[in-house]
Image (cartoon, grey):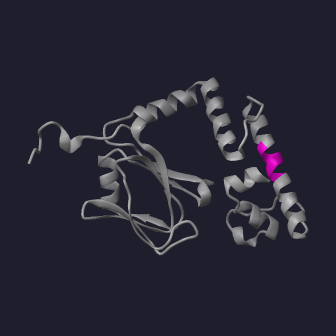
């Protein structure tokens, strides 16, 4: 009725006023009757069913393994500035992302500014480590941060070996054949960030 008037058909909720992100996996992200829906057979975090996704009020959809996205869903998300990030199990790997909207490079420029400034880059890294490990790490050197993380993970593996009464001889994980690893490494690889922080 008011097409082309008042800008109603192109109105968007600013990202500052949106919720952060929603994590989805093991299901299909599709459009039905103009609504973004996630259809899943169920997982440990979400019961089977079809869920309406409020794509105009969230900034990003994080898609974990087992998820598929239809062309129409990508079109709808791009039209309304909703990002899509494709990650590995529990966000351990980052594979791809869809730009936030058409003709807008603000987020890409912000990321480049953070990457190009050494102080901002380390601040971002420290924030990400704090989020993952549940505490602010003391160092401002990326190599030291990685060393702290590595030591923390080794301690987690050793604790898991002791807890489950199995021998552990070190970090042995083949990315090409993850099921071939020993029990301790297999359990540790599948820990959530919260579980990792708790150990």
Q: Does residue 31 sit above or below 19 in this rendering? A: below
Q: Is residue 182 visible?
A: no
Magenta stretch, main secondary structure, is helix
Which of the 4 quarters of the picture holds residue 178? bottom right
Q: Does the magenta segment cover residue 152? A: yes
Write the residue at 73% across / 64% down.
Answer: 174
In the rendered image, is residue 122 in sight?
Answer: yes
Q: Quadrant of residue 29?
A: bottom left
- Judging depth in this view, the residue of 43 and 121 nearest the camera is 43
Looking at the image, how many numbered discs can be counted on the residues?
0
- Left or right, 31 with reference to 166: left
Residue 103: x and y in percent read 31, 37
Question: Would residue 41 be found to the left or right of residue 133 on screen?
Answer: left
Residues rendered magenta in the picture: 149-154
Image coordinates of residue 93 in percent, x first then y, are 60, 54
* Image position of 36 with respect to 111: above or below: below
Up the image or down, 143 lies above or below 24; here it is above
Residue 20 % position (x, y): 48, 45
Q: Nearer the viewer, residue 190 or 109?
A: 190
Residue at image location 80% in from the left, 70% down from the top: 183
Q: Position of residue 130 (x, y in %)?
A: 69, 40
Q: Can residue 167 be found in the magenta stretch? A: no
In percent of the image, x 78 and y 64: which residue is there? 185
């Amino acid at each position: 009725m008011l097409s082309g008037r008042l800008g109603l058909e192109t109105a968007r909720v600013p990202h500052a006023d949106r919720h952060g992100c929603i994590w989805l996996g093991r299901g299909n992200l599709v459009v039905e009757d103009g609504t973004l829906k996630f259809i899943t057979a169920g997982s440990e975090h979400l019961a089977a069913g079809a869920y309406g996704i409020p794509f105009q009020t969230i900034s990003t959809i994080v898609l974990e393994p087992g998820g598929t996205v239809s062309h129409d869903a990508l079109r709808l998300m791009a039209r309304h500035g909703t990002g899509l990030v494709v990650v590995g199990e529990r966000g351990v790997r980052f594979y791809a992302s869809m730009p936030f909207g058409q003709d807008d490079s603000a987020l890409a420029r912000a990321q480049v500014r953070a990457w190009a400034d050494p102080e901002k880059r380390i601040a971002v890294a420290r924030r990400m480590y704090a989020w993952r490990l549940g505490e602010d790490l003391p160092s401002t050197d990326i190599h030291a941060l990685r060393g702290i993380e590595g030591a923390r993970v080794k301690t987690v593996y050793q604790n898991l070996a002791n807890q489950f009464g199995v021998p552990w001889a070190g970090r042995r994980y083949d990315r090409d054949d993850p099921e071939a690893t020993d029990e301790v490494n297999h359990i540790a690889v599948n820990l959530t960030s919260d579980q990792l922080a708790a150990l």
